[in-house]
Image (cartoon, rainbow, N blue to C red):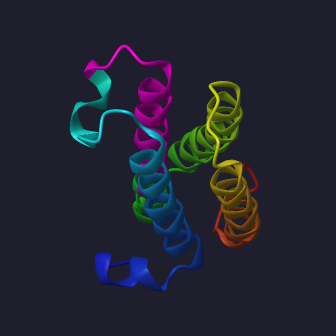
Amino acid sequence: MSSKNLGSIPVYRKALELCDMSRAIAAYVTFNKDLLKLYTSHSLRDIIADALLTDAILIPQKIAQTEFSSSNDEKNRNISFINIMIKNINAYCTGLERDGVQEIEYVNLLRQEIKSFRKAFKKWIGSLPHNGTI
C-alpha cells in the first residue's frame, strides 16, 4: 500500500482528526502557548497537554506502520500500543478536569472524538488481513 492510500483509510483519517482536536484543545487549555516547549513547563496542565499531543500524534504513525507491516507480531504490537494511547488520552481528559479546566465542553468533545475513533479502530482491526493472531 502506498502512502497516498493512507488517506483513504477511515481509521487513519479519524486518527488525524483526533490529532487536530487534541492540538486545538492543548493550545486552548495550556498556560504555555508555545506547544513545542510544553515539555519544559512545570505546570501540571502543560505536562498533560504535552502528553496528550504526543500520544495523539503517535496514533496515526502506528496505524501507518500497521498498514505497511507484513508481520502479525508488529501489527499486534501497534494495535496494543494504539489501545494504550486511547486509554491515556481518556486519562488526560480526566487530568485536565481535575486540574480545573473550566471549558469542560471541550474536554467532552475530545472524549466524543475518542469514542468515534475507537469505533473506526475496531472496524479497522476486523478488516486487517491476518493469520488468526490479531
Residue 40, picture quadrant = top left
Is residue 68 or residue 101 the one in the foreground?
101
- Count the marks: 0
Residue 124, picture quadrant = bottom right
Question: Quarter holding the N terminus?
Answer: bottom left
Is residue 58 or residue 42 the one in the foreground?
42
Q: Is residue 83 visible from the viewing direction of this image?
A: yes
> Does residue 108 lie above or below 88 as drawn?
below
Residue 80, picture quadrant = top right
Q: Residue at x 75, y 71 (%)?
A: 123
> Does residue 26 lie above or below 64 as drawn?
above
**Image position of 41 (left or right of 110):** left
Q: Is residue 70 visible from the viewing direction of this image?
A: no
Q: Residue 119, image x and y in percent?
A: 77, 67
**Image position of 28 (left or right of 73):** left
Q: Residue 36, image x and y in percent?
A: 22, 39
Q: Residue at x 39, y 49 (%)?
A: 27
Which portion, as a residue range, is magenta?
Answer: 40-60
Q: Residue 52, image x and y in percent?
A: 49, 39
Please say whether residue 123 is one of the residues in the magenta stretch.
Answer: no
Please say whether residue 52 is one of the residues in the magenta stretch.
Answer: yes
Is residue 8 or residue 97 the one in the foreground?
97
Q: Residue at x 39, y 83 (%)?
A: 5
